[in-house]
Amino acid sequence: MDAAHDIKRYLPTSVKEMKILGWDSVDIVLFSGDAYVDHPSFGAAVIGRTLLAAGYRVAIVPQPNWRDDLRDFKKFGRPRLFFGVSAGAMDSMVNHYTAARRRRSDDAYTPDGRAGMRPDYPTIVYSDILKNLFPDVPVIAGGIEASLRRVSHYDYWQDRLRPSIIADCRADMLIYGMGERAIKEIAQRLDAGEHIDTITDVRQTVVRCPLSEIPDQTTGADVVLAPWQTVKTDRVAQSLNFRHVEEESNSRNGGRTIWQGHDNFAVKINPMYPAMTQGEIDESFDLPYTRLPHPRYAGKRIPAYEMIRHSVNLHRGCFGGCAFCTISAHQGKFIASRSKQSIMREVKAVTEMPDFKGYISDLGGPSANMYGMHGKKETACAACRRPSCLHPQVCPNLDTDHSGLLDIYHSVDALPEVKKSFIGSGVRYDLSMHATGDARVDAVNRRYNEELIERHVSGRLKVAPEHTEDNVLEVMRKPSFELFYRFKEIFDRVNQRTGKRQQLIPYFISSHPGCTEENMAMLAARTKELDMHLEQIQDFTPTPMTVATEIYYSSVHPYTGQHIYTPVTAEQKLAQRKYFFWYDKTYRDDIIGSLQRMHRPDLIRALYPGRPYPSHTISQKTIRHDNNKSKTSHNEYQQKSHHDSHSTAANGIRRKRRR
């Protein structure tokens, strides 16, 4: 029987399936806000497979109904060891709401994209339900939502600061980051008879402790953050807290223990594990995944799975450190790369899928071209707390050799079953274009760029300059737009040489901290000069655990203490976003009027040569209507990178303060 129909090849999702496996009970039950897809890109499957391989009987309840008689939470009864809960592969609020805080009409991680199959904040809702039903059974929370909310954080959708999520939910413990090692250690210690309350030292976990356990911060052995009572009224203290959290997350050995007082208890955040060894990451990816949705979804389409079903992830981690990105906070800055043998085994499994037509959709990772990269001198990396290895310039200690990645591409393309392999993940062209001074490495990296463009683009190559203006890019931790011009020259030259008509599609963000309306007007003029009508665009959405979000909330940069202008009102955001659509005559008069007020006739001439100045401007209502129709961006879809308005009074206070 093939995997699509053989129920024995999956974790059980019902008591009937459990009995088919010959089990009369389970050790662990996992609850997930996503549909169950048995694939290494889906966290619940990874955790379930990891525990199963360690000898435990594991069941999974995907998208439990939290609104009825709670039968989904009761059906497996009391597990022998613990319950695990996760909101899913995305923070639920990013999943549910747009950057304008409007409810989305679909959910990519649900069969047929149906919305409404998970609550807001499932980590809190699921944990509370389980503790009400089984108060003495440990509840372990994990996943993106728990990971990025592990310390006090700004919640954009409620427009308020929230405490660590462990203070808001009844889970006994949180696991942050990639959880295979932590969940296995916790299971083994519970299985050995330890009580959950005594397990407080596992790396990458967050637990509650008595306030008396917070150490003397003068020793420097641990990091003691400003407490919740302080940061909830002091935005600058919250901003400075973030710097400590990011620096410890970026530490080679996992950093120090972090403490934060929360009313009548302390939140203890244990250090991260160092990046996985090659053997450890191979072990995770080599587990016997079917790579398919559970048979319960027969005849239904899960959009997030469709995107990655014929793709292969090569590594974890990202050292880019972009100000708006959460990858390093969750996966870490240091790269854990799979062996070539492990990658080729998975590629072979993809080629054997019944619907495979010869095309690998992505050989990628968080950033496609960081595979196998590391510091030349590991001792220098061990002492470094720098949040980005690429900004403000590429670290001289970084080995940027792309030859290992080219070898993977060549080996995959040599398989007779593969017609072509594409790179669908984001490519850091500042990394592949960096001049190292080593003639061999520079030649390899030039070849990488040319082979990428010639052989691995499916008609359109997406890259992420994010903006065109240096002052904005500095806050974003992104390179100068001049590099984009240089990369476009390479792209155009390769296209001309090969007779191809491929497109270069850039991603851009409006309303990012540090960005003014005049900056957006310059972006419009520069992209018009490049003959680009922008498609991949996004209004900045603050998500927990990013530098940009802390700036948005506090108006202060956590590292410099400098005040940073940030558009926060709907009017300010719409005033910036309209420049993406300079070519739409609906916006022309309003843009010209804005540029007149800014005394920028040069930009009017650049965008609308020969046009007379208008006598009126269009309404904000028209702008809002058109923005509702604009395309979802990469940032919304990824994290998708979470939105509910707070009170009118609170919004009014924010606007007054910003002015």
Image (spheres, helix red, strand yellow):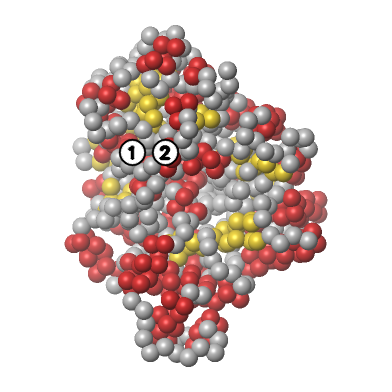
| Residue 438, image x, y percentages | 78, 53
What residue is shown at x 61% (from left), y 28% (from top)? 282
Residue with the mark numbered 2: 110
Quarter containing the N terminus: top right
**Along the line of sight, which residue is nearer the eye, 279 or 297?**
297
Residue visible at 36% across and 51% down in the picture: 104
Residue shown at the point (43%, 76%) measured from the top left = 586
Q: Amino acid at mark 1?
A: Arg
Helix, strand or loop under label 1: loop
Q: Is residue 525 left or right of residue 110?
A: right
- Quadrant assignment for the C terminus: bottom left
Residue shown at 24% from the left, 69% from the top: 656
Is residue 495 something one can see in this rendering? Answer: yes
**Residue 313: percent from left, percent from top:** 60, 38
Instruction: Determine whether label 2 and label 1 are within 8 Å by CB.
Output: yes
Q: Position of residue 255 (x, y in %)?
A: 47, 39
User: Is 637 left or right of 137, judged from the image as shown?
Assistant: right
Determine if residue 210 is in view. Answer: no
Mark 2–mark 1 distance (CA, rounded to whole Å): 9 Å
Residue 315: quarter of image:
top right
In the image, 656 versus 574, the foreground residue is 574
Q: Is residue 569 left or right of residue 13?
A: left
Label total for image: 2
Q: Secondary structure at mark 2?
A: loop
Give residue 118's mark. Answer: 1
Q: Name the front one of labels 2 and 1.
A: 2
Q: Residues within 10 Å of mark 2 (few under 14, many from 20)?
A: many
Q: Residues within 10 Å of mark 1 (few under 14, many from 20)?
A: many
Which residue sits furthest left?
649
What amino acid type is highlighted by mark number 2? Thr
